[in-house]
């Protein structure tokens, strides 16, 4: 184990024999760190945090600190981080807020500099969260999602599998799987690039596009659109899309802009040069 002499490590921390710990790192009690983990200078790993094998943590990250919740009663809560994650400079991840609860980060995720995961977030696998993105408490992010820079996500929102959220967006609704979202909770298209990178077949992508069209680009309301999709005998990928929407409690992102919102964000026809 390579530990810099300036690091402060509580004797109750459980650290694998080959972990690398840089200058001025602080590791509190009841911390578990797996094999091959690398921890750069000035990182603080707070109590009740576990970090899986192969994770790399860059300078200044703060992992497992108390939640930003005035109702927190200083009870035992947890942060669990999986394997082979990259956590860049000054990332902050808070542990759960209610007694016995936890914030969870899966495997093979890339969390870029200064992003924040609030208490009780649940992050899947192979997720990318870019610089400065802010996730409030209880946000769920499914596998393969891409959250761009400086995105702000409201508490309790769900971000679906292999979706993408464009930079500087504010999200206060659920983002269905496979969708591309920009602006204030607005779906623009399917995430075609992400689906191809995930090696989805042309047939599956076509069926996802059909489902997207029924939900977002027809006269049907959401219930009617889902019934049409179910009548087509969808495969598991499209069925996940359907179930995600069915289980939404906050409602799903709408299609582009409507009425005054569209005029405000896109400008009038005269301003944009559109004709007819």
Image: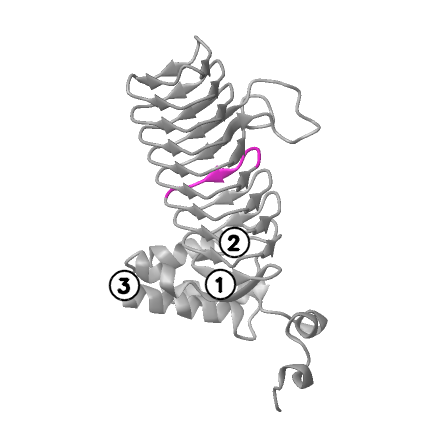
Give me the residue at 57% from left, 44% from top: 134
Q: Is residue 164 above or below residue 122?
A: below
**Residue 74 rendering spot, x and y as whole percentages:** 63, 18
- Whether residue 234 is visible, yes or no, is no
In front of the other: 22 or 272: 22
User: Image quarter for residue 70?
Assistant: top right
The answer for how far apart the CA atoms under marks 3 and 1 are is 22 Å
Residue at position x 55%, y 53% in the image: 174
Relative placement, left or right, of 91 versus 4 is: right
Q: Position of residue 44 (x, y in %)?
A: 50, 24
Q: Which residue is mark 3?
A: 201
Q: Sequence order check: which comes first, mark 2 or mark 3?
A: 3
Above or below, 159 against 96 in this view is below
Mark 3: give few (<14), some (14-19) or many (20+) Cα within 10 Å: few
- To which residue does mark 2 refer? 246
In the picture shown, does residue 275 fall above or below 33? below
The mark lying in front, picked from 2 and 3, is 3
- State the mark number for residue 43: none
Q: Which residue is mark 1?
A: 226
Question: Magenta residues?
Answer: 118-125
């Amino acid at each position: 184990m390579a530990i810099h002499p300036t690091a402060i490590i509580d004797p109750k921390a459980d650290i694998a024999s080959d972990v690398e710990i840089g200058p001025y790192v602080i590791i509190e009690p009841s911390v578990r760190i797996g094999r091959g983990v690398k921890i750069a200078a000035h990182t603080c790993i707070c109590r009740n945090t576990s970090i899986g094998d192969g994770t790399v943590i860059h300078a200044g990250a703060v992992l497992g600190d108390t939640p930003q919740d005035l109702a927190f009663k200083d009870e035992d809560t947890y942060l669990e981080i999986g394997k082979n994650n990259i956590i860049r400079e000054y990332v902050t991840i808070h542990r759960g807020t209610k007694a016995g609860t936890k914030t969870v980060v899966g495997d093979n995720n890339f969390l870029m500099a200064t992003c924040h995961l609030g208490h009780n977030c649940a992050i899947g696998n192979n997720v990318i969260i870019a610089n400065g993105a802010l996730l409030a408490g209880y946000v769920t992010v499914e596998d393969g999602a891409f959250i761009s820079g400086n995105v702000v996500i409201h508490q309790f929102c769900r971000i679906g599998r292999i979706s993408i959220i464009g930079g500087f967006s504010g999200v206060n609704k659920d983002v269905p799987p496979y969708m591309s979202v920009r602006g204030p909770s607005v779906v623009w298209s399917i995430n075609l690039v992400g689906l191809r990178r995930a090696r989805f077949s042309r047939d599956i992508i076509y069926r996802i596009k059909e489902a997207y069209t029924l939900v977002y680009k027809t006269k049907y309301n959401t219930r009617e659109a889902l019934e049409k999709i179910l009548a087509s005998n969808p495969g598991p990928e499209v069925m996940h899309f359907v179930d995600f929407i069915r289980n939404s409690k906050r409602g799903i992102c709408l299609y582009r802009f409507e009425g005054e919102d569209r005029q405000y964000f896109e400008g009038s026809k005269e301003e944009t040069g559109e004709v007819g």
